[in-house]
Amino acid sequence: MCAFRVNRSGTAGGMGLDGPSRRLLSVIIAVMQKGDVVLIKASRGEPGVRRVWDPAPDRPWVCLEEYWERWQNNQVEPVCWQVARGQVFQYDTALAGELEAAFAARAKDAGRLEQLWAGAKPAS
C-alpha cells in the first residue's frame, strides 16, 4: 500500500496565500497501486499473497509473485485474474503466517480463521 499527501491551497476574496482567508486542505489517501503486495481471501477463506497488476476499482487484477518477477525480468506479461475488492487486504507478514496456520487447522478451529480475516485491513 502506498500513502501520499495531496495539498491544495485556495484563497478567497482575491487575497494572496499570506492573507487571512488562506485555506490549506490536506488529505491523506491510501490507494492500491500496481505492484503492491496484498493478501487475498480465496474460497473457503484460504489466504493468498499476490501482486496487484491492475488496481481496478471494483475488481482488481492480481497475479502470483513468480509471474510478477517473470514480468520484471523478461517483460512477459503475467497470468492475472480478477478478485472482488472485498477479498483484497493490506499485506502484513505476521497476519499472512497466522492465516496460513489457521487455514491448515480450520477443521479443528474454524472460528480462528474467520476471526483473523475479520481483523484484516481492507486494501484501498
Image (tube, rainbow, N blue to C red):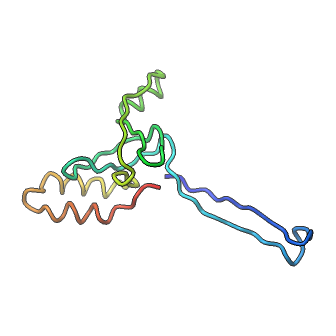
Horizontal placement of 100 versus 123: left or right?
A: left
Horizontal placement of 116 versus 14: left or right?
A: left
In front here: 73 or 115?
115
In front here: 109 or 25?
25
Residue 123: x and y, percent?
43, 55
Give me the residue at 78% from left, 72% from top.
23
> Residue 109's image quarter?
bottom left
Residue 47: x and y, percent?
26, 49
Residue 90: x and y, percent?
40, 55
Looking at the image, is 20 positioned above or below residue 101? below
Give me the residue at 24% from left, 55% from top.
99
Give me the residue at 61% from left, 56% from top.
4
Give me the residue at 12% from left, 56% from top.
106
> Residue 82's image quarter?
top left
- Residue at the farthest left position: 108
Horizontal placement of 103 versus 33: left or right?
A: left
> Residue 19's image quarter?
bottom right
Q: How many marks?
A: 0
Residue 100: x and y, percent?
22, 51
